[in-house]
Image (cartoon, helix red, strand yellow):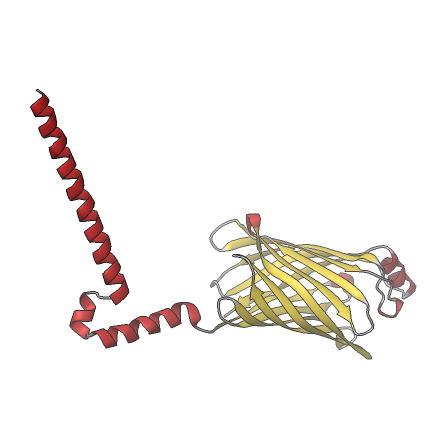
C-alpha cells in the first residue's frame, strides 16, 4: 500500500510539473508573439507592411483629430409679446484629451430689429476625468454700445445620472467676477421623442449697475423642450421657458422699466454634425 501511495504521489508530481511547464511555454510563446507582432497576416503580407498597417490603426483610433458642431438651441421665443430669436451653439476640434472649443449665444429682438446681446468664447479644453474636461480661454460680449472681454475658467461634462453640466467662472477686464452654471437632462419618452429639462443660474460677486447685474444669484432660468428627432442630427422642438431676475438685479430691471420675470413659449431646431 505504501508503494502504491508513493507511485500515486510521483504521478501527481509529474503531472503538475508537466502542466506548469506547458503554461510557462505558452506564456513564453505568447510573449514572443506579442513582442514580434506576428500573425497569419504577417506571413501573407509581410512584416513591414503589417507594421505600417498597425501604426495607421493606432493613429486613426486614438491620435486622430476630429470635430463636432452643435446648434443646441436655435429658437423663436414669444417673450410675452416682445419676440426674440435665441441661438446657443458650440463646437470643438481636437483629439481625445485636448480640444479647441468655440461657443456662442445671444438674442436678437424682432421689435427693436437689433441684437440685445451676443457672446463668443474661445477655449482650450483638457480631459481630466473620464467624463469631464477643464476649460480655459476668453469670452467677448458684443453688448449694444459697450463690448467687454472676460477670462474664462470652467468645467464641462457628463455628471452621474446623465446630467450634462457646463459651469464657468468669468473675470472681466475691470475685475468684475461672475459665474454661470447650466444643466440639462434628456428623458427618452420614445426612441425619437425626447423631453429635455434645462436650468441656467447666473451669479455675480459684486454689483455692476452699469450692466444691470446684482451680487449673489442674479438670474435663474428654467425650461423644458420636447423634441422629435426626424434624424439624430435634426430635431424640431417646442417648449416653455421661465426667466427670473433675483435680488439687486431685479431692482435694476425694474428701474429700467422692465419686468424681472418673464415666460416664453419657444419653438426651434436642434441640430449637429
Q: Is residue 45 above or below residue 267?
A: below
* Closest to the observer, 235 or 9: 9
Tell me the quarter of the image containing the N terminus: top left
Residue 75: % across, % down: 64, 66
Residue at 26% across, 58% down: 31
Count of numbered tags: 0
In which image quadrant can residue 18 be found? top left
Taking the image as shown, residue 217 lies to the left or right of residue 92, namely: right
Relative side of 235 to 122, left or right: left
Q: Position of residue 78 (x, y in %)?
A: 72, 63
Q: Position of residue 57 (x, y in %)?
A: 34, 70
In this view, the residue farthest toward the top is 1
**Is residue 109 among the parts visible in the rendering?**
no
Q: Quadrant of residue 90?
A: bottom right
At 72% from the left edge and 61% from the top edge, which residue is drawn?
A: 180
Query: Residue 195's x, y, as percent?
Result: 58, 52
Image height of 80 relative to 56, above or below = above
Is any part of residue 160 visible from this angle? yes
Identity of the residue drawn at 49% across and 55% down: 192
Residue 252 lies, with reference to residue 150, above or below; the image says: above
Q: Is residue 27 left or right of residue 89?
A: left
Residue drawn at point x = 72 percent, y = 71 percent: 151
* Of the pair 266 and 249, the residue shown nearer to us: 249
Residue, far bottom: 145
Quarter-of-image position of residue 118:
bottom right
Amino acid at each position: 500500500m505504501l508503494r502504491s501511495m508513493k507511485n500515486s504521489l510521483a504521478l501527481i508530481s509529474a503531472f503538475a510539473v508537466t502542466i506548469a511547464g506547458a503554461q510557462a511555454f505558452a506564456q513564453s510563446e505568447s510573449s514572443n508573439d506579442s513582442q514580434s507582432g506576428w500573425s497569419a497576416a504577417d506571413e501573407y503580407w509581410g512584416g513591414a507592411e503589417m507594421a505600417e498597417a498597425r501604426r495607421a490603426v493606432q493613429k486613426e483610433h486614438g491620435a486622430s483629430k476630429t470635430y463636432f458642431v452643435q446648434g443646441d438651441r436655435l429658437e423663436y421665443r414669444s417673450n410675452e409679446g416682445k419676440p426674440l430669436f435665441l441661438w446657443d451653439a458650440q463646437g470643438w476640434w481636437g483629439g481625445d484629451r485636448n480640444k479647441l472649443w468655440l461657443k456662442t449665444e445671444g438674442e436678437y429682438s424682432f421689435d427693436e430689429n437689433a441684437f440685445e446681446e451676443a457672446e463668443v468664447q474661445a477655449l482650450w479644453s483638457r480631459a481630466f476625468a473620464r467624463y469631464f474636461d477643464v476649460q480655459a480661454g476668453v469670452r467677448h460680449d458684443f453688448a449694444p454700445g459697450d463690448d467687454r472681454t472676460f477670462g474664462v475658467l470652467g468645467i464641462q461634462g457628463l455628471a452621474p445620472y446623465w446630467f450634462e453640466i457646463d459651469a464657468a467662472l468669468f473675470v472681466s477686464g475691470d475685475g468684475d467676477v461672475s459665474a454661470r452654471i447650466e444643466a440639462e437632462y434628456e428623458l427618452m419618452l420614445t426612441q425619437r421623442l425626447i423631453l429635455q429639462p434645462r436650468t441656467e443660474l447666473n451669479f455675480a460677486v459684486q454689483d455692476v449697475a452699469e450692466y444691470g447685474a446684482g451680487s449673489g444669484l442674479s438670474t435663474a432660468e428654467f425650461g423644458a423642450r420636447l423634441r422629435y428627432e426626424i434624424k439624430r442630427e435634426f430635431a424640431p422642438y417646442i417648449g416653455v421657458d421661465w426667466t427670473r431676475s433675483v435680488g439687486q438685479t431685479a431692482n435694476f430691471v425694474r428701474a429700467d422699466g422692465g419686468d424681472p420675470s418673464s415666460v416664453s413659449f419657444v419653438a426651434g431646431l436642434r441640430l449637429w454634425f
